[in-house]
Amino acid sequence: MNGYRVAVVGATGAVGTRMIEMLEQSSLPIANVKYLASKRSAGKILKFKEQEITVEELVPESFEEIDLALFSAGGGVSKKFAPEAVKRGAVVVDNTSAFRMDPEVPLVVPEVNENALYQHKGLIANPNCSTIQMVVALEPIRKAFGLKKVIVTTLQAVSGAGNRAIKELHDETEAVLNGEAYEPQILPVAGDKKHYQIAFNPLAQIDVFEDDGYTHEEWKMIHETKKIMEDENIQVTATCVRVPVAVAHSESVWFELEKNGATVSKLHDLLKRAPGVVLEDDPENQIYPQAVNAEGKKETFVGRVRPDQEQSNAFHLYCVSDNLLKGAAWNSVQIAERLHALDLLRVPK
Amino acid sequence: MNGYRVAVVGATGAVGTRMIEMLEQSSLPIANVKYLASKRSAGKILKFKEQEITVEELVPESFEEIDLALFSAGGGVSKKFAPEAVKRGAVVVDNTSAFRMDPEVPLVVPEVNENALYQHKGLIANPNCSTIQMVVALEPIRKAFGLKKVIVTTLQAVSGAGNRAIKELHDETEAVLNGEAYEPQILPVAGDKKHYQIAFNPLAQIDVFEDDGYTHEEWKMIHETKKIMEDENIQVTATCVRVPVAVAHSESVWFELEKNGATVSKLHDLLKRAPGVVLEDDPENQIYPQAVNAEGKKETFVGRVRPDQEQSNAFHLYCVSDNLLKGAAWNSVQIAERLHALDLLRVPK
């Protein structure tokens, strides 16, 4: 074998197409790729570098002779097919929420908890997009000063809800500009009862509501952050808002540190050296992270670092990242690269 | 006299035109109105109810025979002309930041600190838009449980930067949808050095940056809140973000209470009874405040009330209000109505 046999599940989706791009750019040795999707998308032709690949219908047997399977076709698909893949010897990196909180499954952001990969049993979960960029930004600070509490408000792009949501934002925005009627059918949550206008209208709902008044997206940010940072004592609370943006999430993060002595200058130094982080923080020259600049990039862009003026050891930052790349496709491929580098890209006996 | 002689300064602007609408709907007895603006806008004809009014160029003598002057033409104009108006016997309600932090000038949101009107010396300041809706939402809670700390992230509409910013959002959005180039000239801040795309791109800058890394908009939220609530001990910190929305600001507010015993149900009861507040909080039925529903309304809409799950006495809420109405024009006219009701609509000797 001169490379891995790789399957992409959900290859035609917003994340799936980016997974293919990330694999094309990856240093991972790849022998061949297989694109899998629902029956509806089977037969479509997608490229891998110069090669044309016909999308196949996903069945359990799809994973025979596969070493690595990247899943991004919804939680239901992962629940059903990820175990089938592992059973057949494929290592699965799953981008859905199906297994994230399973204590047997590592939930990994390589910049934060790469070591958790050593515990994998064939399945590794990719965290929620909004969580990933926040922990990438906070981890260098946590390492130096400890993290006591995080309060985050997100401004999230519609592409987190898939290609249909991007199209809805586009078509609805055109309709509003032309004074025409438009009936929303996807946002805020495709599977929920009501759909609302996103064009020129933020929606304070991402994913469905839990009984406690939090949305499931907020729940994910709270619980995934603790699992990734391996510290149940970090207090996290979140408000997640969908905004009329196609790609890249923006996040306003307030955080309280355990230790004394942090300054903006020290936090800047930590962020400048941090893996996966680009510091864009120069207020005098109006430099701060922006969605349009982050789109298509793998890094998390961090700026607006400043102290809470009335609480020592509390600060703000603002981070922006491409939700389809670091928030999904790139983090998944990056996990695969790290598995390879650590000689872990195989299902343990 | 069977009514007040009213001048609107900045009558052709985004807020000025709303001030006229609010005066038209007001119970305030009005004898006549005068519309004032820069030389550039003089000669334009605007309505007051059925009447056609020619906009006049603003000069100090404009305020002869005026009882009430509503200013919304920029801080420089207010600094120069508001004292001229008061000198001539007009009570000024100023919607700019020129006098807000002047200890001699009441800064008033009628639902919160109407009593401050008794101290006026001819000039009353209207607070910043983003501050007003937050204090309207928090005041009933503060009264019952005390307020220790507030951390707010705003998602603010471009109309706060005037009619030219609304046009920029519209034209730029069309250009982006059509794949055409567009050179931003207004946002984020007309008078600042650089201008950035707002279409599909949040901008974490409203007003200019202070030396401490906060924007002036954030500074206003911090300091105006303390002044309006008449309590320097309330800790307030803010991140203000401009979003691609034409009208109505949305705010994600985390707050810590002084006293024990608050519950979502108790906060709901307080908010239901609170003046100027409409509670829209029914997650099960996907009911939460939205900009498109708040536009054109005078109230502040509040929802997403829920406890911080790891800090007793800390909660979240999400509030939305029309930044041109409660955030500016309506609050100004409401101040005038309350001055009239309290027999304070005259310059004290």
Image (cartoon, coloured by chain):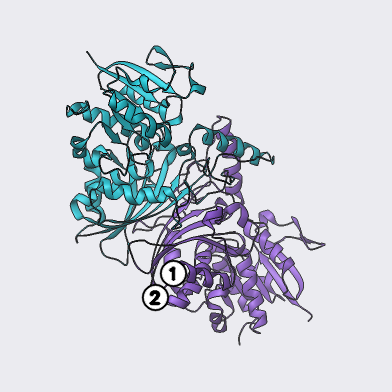
Chain colours: A purple, B cyan
Q: Give x and y (percent) for residue A106.
A: 52, 77
Q: Secondary structure at mark 1?
A: loop
Picture quadrant of residue A239: bottom left
- Residue at image point 51% right, 77% down: A105
Q: What is the quadrant of residue B116 in the picture?
A: top left
Chain under callout 1: A
For residue A288, side relative to residue A16 (left or right): left
**Taking B253 as reference, is B313 left or right?**
left
Seen as rendered, the residue at the extreme bottom is A349
Along the viewing direction, whichever of B227 and A46 lies nearer the viewer? B227
Instruction: Tell me the crowding category of disc 1: few under 14, some 14 to 19, or many 20 or more residues within 10 angstroms, Cα based.
Output: some
The label on residue B81 is none
* Vertical relation: A39 (above or below) B30: below
State the SS at label 2.
loop
List x then y, in percent, for residue A306: 44, 62
Between residues A143 and B200, which one lies in front from this camera angle?
A: A143
Q: Nearer the viewer, residue A216 or A303?
A: A303
Residue A263 marker? 1
Say which residue label 2 marks. A232
